[in-house]
Image (cartoon, helix red, strand yellow):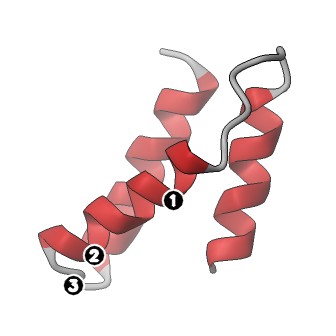
Amino acid sequence: MSDLEKLVRRRMQEEYAKGASAEEIAKVVRDIFNSIDLSGNRFDAVAVQATRDHE
């Protein structure tokens, strides 16, 4: 499992534990993927930063 997959799973579990709706969880996941720069090899670091920005 890649770091990105781990990140997405962890964030989904965190949101679910907080009682977030499916729509709210989907928005968090969308935000992560929308913030990733797939043109380079640093996408995991960008995703981590996006996660921190969302909180």
| Disc 1 residue crowd, few under 14, some 14–19, many 20+, Cα 10 Å | some
Q: Depth check: 24 or 40 in front?
A: 40
Vertical relation: 43 (above or below) 24 = above
Q: CA distance from mark 1 to mark 3?
A: 18 Å
Which x, y percent locates residue 37? 73, 32
| Disc 3 residue crowd, few under 14, some 14–19, many 20+, Cα 10 Å | few
Which x, y percent locates residue 7? 55, 42
- Asked which secondary structure carries label 1, the reply is helix
Q: Which mark is residue 19?
A: 3
Q: CA distance from mark 2 to mark 1?
A: 11 Å
Three-letter amino acid code at disc 2?
A: Glu
Image position of 54 (left or right of 49):
left
Give the residue displayed 65% in from the left and 61% down from the top.
Answer: 51
Q: Which residue is mark 1?
A: 31
Looking at the image, tell me whether mark 3 or mark 2 is earlier in sequence order: 3
Give the residue displayed 21% in from the left and 84% down from the top.
Answer: 19
Which x, y percent locates residue 17? 28, 75
- Which quadrant: the C terminus? bottom right
Give the residue displayed 55% in from the left and 51% down from the top.
Answer: 32
Image position of 16 (left or right of 47):
left
Image position of 17 (left or right of 54):
left
Q: Quadrant of residue 30?
A: bottom left
- Asked which secondary structure carries label 3, the reply is loop
Three-letter amino acid code at disc 1?
A: Asp
Three-letter amino acid code at disc 3?
A: Gly
- Asked which secondary structure carries label 2, the reply is helix
Vertical relation: 26 (above or below) 3 = below
| Disc 2 residue crowd, few under 14, some 14–19, many 20+, Cα 10 Å | some
Callout 3–callout 2 Cβ contact below 8 Å: no
Q: Which residue is mark 2?
A: 24
Q: Depth check: 8 or 33 in front?
A: 33
Which x, y percent locates residue 24? 28, 75
